Image (tube, grey):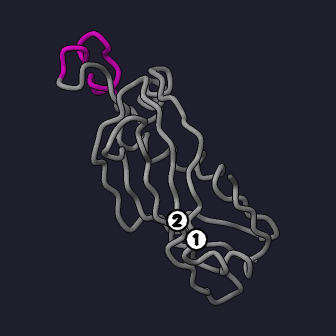
Amino acid sequence: MTTTVHGVDHIASLAGTDLGHTDWMEITQERVNTFADATDDHQWIHVDTERAADSPFGGTIAHGYLTLALIIPLFTELLTISGIGMSVNYGLNKVRFPAPVRVGAKIRLRGAVADVTELAGNGVEMTLNFTVEIHDSEKPACVAQAIYRHYA
């Protein structure tokens, strides 16, 4: 379910809100290969399906940074913001990759608004706790704390 807010004041009211989770997204070899091309990271564990079959993972795995980057499109399933002039990704406080994402696995994003603070100039800074879950796995693929700034 998507949470929808309008305006900076409404964003401020989200502090402490659990945003729930997204639908599952399958990680395909095509997506991994496209990311490898975009980042020039063609390590065999990501793109060489034959060699990776003999690895401890039993096949190719997604780049950790691909998993992190997928937070952006998945996040749009959790929160929609309107009535503001601009939003910027301000950065990350902490990122970890506890478990690999095998190609063919499904992931989803779980999110919560940890804190919202006012900024000078009619804006807010929103700190979010994200967990990228892997279907049928006890360990998550990624845990990250992200910071976004929104301005009226």
Mark 2 surroundings within 10 Å by alpha-carbon count, few (fewer than 14), some (14 through 19), many (20 or more): many
Q: Secondary structure at mark 1?
A: loop
Kind of residue at badge 2:
Ala
The vertical placement of 115 against 38, above or below, is: below
The answer to whether 137 appears left or right of 19 in the picture is left
In which image quadrant can residue 45 be found? Answer: top left
Q: Secondary structure at mark 2?
A: strand
Kind of residue at badge 1:
Thr
Residue under circle 1?
17
**Residue sitting at x 43%, y 54%:** 131
Residue 64 x/y as whole percent: 35, 42
Highlighted magenta segment, given as a residue range: 42-55
**Residue sitting at x 51%, y 43%:** 108
The answer to whether 107 appears left or right of 137 in the picture is right
Query: Which of these two is toward me, 143 or 93?
Result: 143
Q: Do the numbered discs 2 and 1 sit on residues whose CB atoms are within 8 Å?
A: yes
The answer to whether 55 appears left or right of 14 in the picture is left
If the image is split into quadrants, where does the C terminus sit? bottom right
In which image quadrant can residue 121 be found? Answer: bottom right
Q: Distance of mark 2 from mark 1, alpha carbons?
A: 6 Å
Residue 145 x/y as whole percent: 43, 64
**Residue sitting at x 74%, y 82%:** 9
The answer to whether 52 appears left or right of 75 in the picture is left
* Residue 50 in magenta stretch: yes
Residue under circle 2?
112
Which mark sits nearer the N-terminus, 2 or 1? 1
